[in-house]
Structures are given as C-alpha cells and as structure tokens.
Amino acid sequence: MDIYLVRHGEAAARWAEAPDPGLSDLGQQQARAAAQLLRPRVAAGAVELLSSPLARTLETAAPLAAELGLAVRVNEAFREIRAPVPLAQRQTWLRQFMQQLMARTVKIMAFNIRDQ
C-alpha cells in the first residue's frame, strides 16, 4: 500500500486574516501541479482521497479527484490542531507547540534506540 501526503496549496489569506480560507491563485496552480504529479502514480490501484474539512485542503484535493473521477472523503482526523489562543496568536502558539512535540519525539526515539 502506498500513502501519499499532500500539504495544501497556498492559502488565499493568512491565519490572522481568516479562519478557513480557500486557495490563492498560486495555491490553485499548486493543486493542479500536485494532481498532474500524482495521477500516473495512483491511476493503476485502488485509490481513496481523504481530506480535512478545511476549504484549502478540499480545494487542493479537487483537481486530482476530478482527474480520477473520485469523491474526496472528509475525515475530521486531518483537521488542524485546535489552538487555545485567539486566531492572531495561533502561529506563535503552533510553532511553540510543534517544537515541544518534536523535543518529546526525539527523546522517545533516543530512548527506543538505546533499548535495542
């Protein structure tokens, strides 16, 4: 089984400007380019397209879904991490959250490597 993860294309607005922006013109181009790149890789097998419910992710998946004649299945598990801070502070909070998460992950990996 092959799994391809695609990050959404460029959003039409920044975090502090809109909670759920769609894609910018560049983001639409990026989505089409991703579809062109993935189309030959996924055409032969059983394919399922999953997306978060956010507009920019659904718009990123749409060109590939159209080329393959498939529907995009929304899965809440792919939603962004909920932030306990106002929208304007989310980027700073998320950066700190991810740094802490990575530090814990590195510690766990180091622990597992020593045990082997």
Image (cartoon, rainbow, N blue to C red):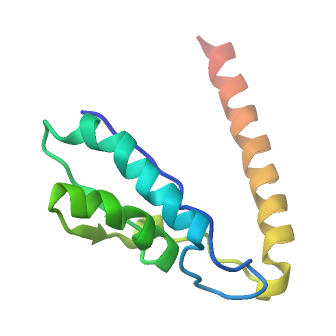
Observer-nearest of 7 and 69: 69
Rendered view: 66 above or below 48: below
Q: In the figure, residue 68 lies in which quadrant?
A: bottom left
Q: In the figure, residue 67 lies in which quadrant?
A: bottom left
- Asked whether, in this view, residue 19 is left or right of residue 16, the answer is left
- Asked whether, in this view, residue 58 is left or right of residue 64, the answer is right
Could you tell me residue 61's position as x and y percent?
A: 37, 63
Observer-nearest of 52 and 110: 52
Rendered view: 116 above or below 43: above
Q: Residue at x 23, y 64 (%)?
A: 66
Rendered view: 53 above or below 108: below
Could you tell me residue 52's position as x and y percent?
A: 43, 70
Observer-nearest of 33 and 84: 33
Could you tell me residue 89's position as x and y percent?
A: 85, 80
Quadrant into which the C terminus falls:
top right
Q: Residue at x 19, y 48 (%)?
A: 47
* Residue situated furthest top in the rendering: 116
